Image (spheres, rainbow, N blue to C red):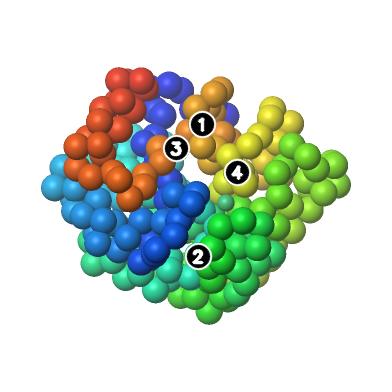
Amino acid sequence: MTVGIATMPFVLMYHSVDTYEHDPHLITVSPDRFDRQMRWLQARGLRGVSVRELLDAQAAGSARGLVALTFDDGYADFATRVTPLLVRYGFTATVFMVAGHVAGRNEWDDGPRKPLMDHQQLRAVADVGMEVASHGLRHRRLPDLTESELHEELHGSRDALERMVDRPVRGFAYPYGVLTAREAEAVEKAGYDYGCAIWDEHPCRHALARTYVGERDHRLRLTAKALRHRLRWRTRI
Ligand SMILES: [Zn+2]
C-alpha cells in the first residue's frame, strides 16, 4: 500500500539522548535540549506518538496534530532518559532495536561505544506504551546482503523482538537509511506494516521519509523543518 502524498506523516528521527563530550556522527541530543524540543511540540499543540499510532490514526482520519518520534538502534538511554520524559508529556515513540545486540553496544559504529537496552528495559518501555520495532539483527547494510541473509535480518530480528516484548512487531527501520526497491519489497513481503527510511526519494509506506533532529535544533530550526515538511507534502501539522 502506498502512502498518498497528502498523508505523508511527519516523522522525527533521533538516536540517543544523553550527556556527551564527543559525538562525531551527531547522533546524540543532550537531555536538556530534548526536553525543550518536546516542550516546543507541546506548545504548538502537537503530540509525539509512535509510528504505529500515527499510521493507525491516519487510517481513522484523526491524525491532526500528531508527530511520530523515532529512536534508532535502541540505546539504553531510551529506557533511562527518553521514556520517563515522554511519559511525563503524555507522549509515546517508536524505538528501532538492533535485535542481535540486545544488552550489547553499538559495535557497528566507529564513534563512541554506547550501551544498548537489555531485555528487561525493552520489556519495560513496551509496557508503558512505547512501540518496539526492528532495526535488523546486526545493523548491516541491507542492499549488500544475499536473499537468505536479508530474510534472516527481517524475520530473525522480528521473531527475537516479539519473544522479548511479547507483542507484535510491526515496523522496520533500514540500517543507515539505505535501501533499494528490493529491500522495500522484502520488508513488505515479510509482513511488516511499515518501513522507515531517512531520505525522501520515492517515499511510500515501506520507506517513510524522516526528519533528522539534533542538538542544534532549537525552536526556530524546528519550526523551519515542520514548515518545510508541510509545504513539501501539503500536510496539516
Ligand atoms: Zn542505526
Identify the residue under disc 4: 176
How far apart are the alpha carbons under marks 2 and 3?
A: 19 Å
Identify the residue under disc 1: 199
Amino acid type at circle 3 is Arg
Amino acid type at circle 2 is Tyr
Q: Is residue 21 above or below residue 10?
A: below
Could you tell which of marks 1 and 2 lies nearer the N-terminus?
A: 2
Check disc 1 and report its element: helix, strand or loop. Answer: loop
Q: Is residue 119 above or below residue 133?
A: below
Identify the residue under disc 3: 210
Amino acid type at circle 4 is Tyr
How far apart are the alpha carbons under marks 1 and 2?
A: 22 Å
Where residue 56 sits: x, y (%)?
42, 43
Ligand 1 closer than 8 Å to label 1 CB: no
Where residue 112 sits: x, y (%)?
54, 63
Identify which residue is drawn at 37% across, 22% down. 233
Q: Are marks 1 and 4 in contact (CB under 8 Å)?
A: no
Q: Are marks 2 and 3 in contact (CB under 8 Å)?
A: no
Could you tell which of marks 4 and 3 lies nearer the N-terminus?
A: 4
Is residue 228 left or right of 168 when viewed as pictured?
left
Could you tell which of marks 1 and 4 lies nearer the N-terminus?
A: 4
Q: Are marks 2 and 4 in contact (CB under 8 Å)?
A: no
Check disc 2 and report its element: helix, strand or loop. Answer: loop
Q: Dot 4: within a 10 Å radius of its alpha carbon, few (fewer than 14), some, or many (20 or more) residues?
A: some
Identify the residue under disc 2: 75
Is residue 152 left or right of 175 when viewed as pictured?
right
Ligand 1 closer than 8 Å to label 4 CB: yes
Where residue 236 sits: x, y (%)?
26, 28
Q: Which mark's residue is nearer the viewer, 2 or 3?
A: 2
